[in-house]
């Protein structure tokens, strides 16, 4: 999307990688919950809030949860592990 908006590929890649590095660093360096960190960097009506609204609208959280469950199930298939998933 950034490239479609006219941002050069190299800059778009740098923005994404630094955003991920920054968010990951905050998670590693603090004991705060991800939601707490998200709230700390989200200004009401700001750009992050606009992006988060789209994630919610398009169901990003359920998609990620489904992807994790699918990967876990496939991992069990590949390893021959027939034990039920934790918490099941």
Image (tube, rainbow, N blue to C red):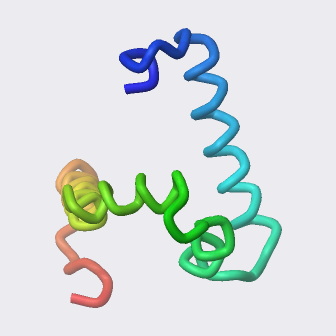
Can see residue 80? no
Query: Looking at the picture, does residue 53 appear above or below residue 33?
Result: above
Q: Relative to the observer, which residue lies in front, 9 or 88?
A: 9
Name the residue at the right extreme: 29
Q: Quadrant of residue 56?
A: bottom left
Give percent across and percent down for residue 10. 61, 12
Q: Quadrant of residue 21?
A: top right
Q: Relative to the observer, which residue lies in front, 64 or 12?
A: 12
Give percent across and percent down for residue 47. 52, 52
Q: Is residue 63 left or right of residue 86?
A: left
Q: Relative to the observer, which residue lies in front, 10 or 72?
A: 10
Query: Looking at the picture, does residue 14 appear above or below residue 63?
Result: above
Which residue is found at the position 55% from the left and 10% from the top? 8
Q: Is residue 60 left or right of residue 45?
A: left
Name the residue at the front extreme: 45
Can see residue 49? yes
Q: Quadrant of residue 52?
A: bottom left
């Amino acid at each position: 999307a950034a490239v479609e908006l006219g941002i050069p590929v190299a800059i778009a890649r740098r923005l994404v990688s630094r955003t991920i590095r920054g968010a990951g660093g905050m998670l590693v360096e603090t004991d705060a919950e991800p939601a707490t960190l998200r709230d700390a960097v989200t200004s009401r009506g700001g750009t992050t809030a606009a992006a988060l609204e789209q994630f919610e609208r398009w169901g990003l959280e359920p998609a990620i949860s489904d992807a994790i469950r699918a990967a876990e199930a496939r991992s069990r298939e590949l390893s021959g592990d027939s034990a039920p998933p934790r918490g099941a």
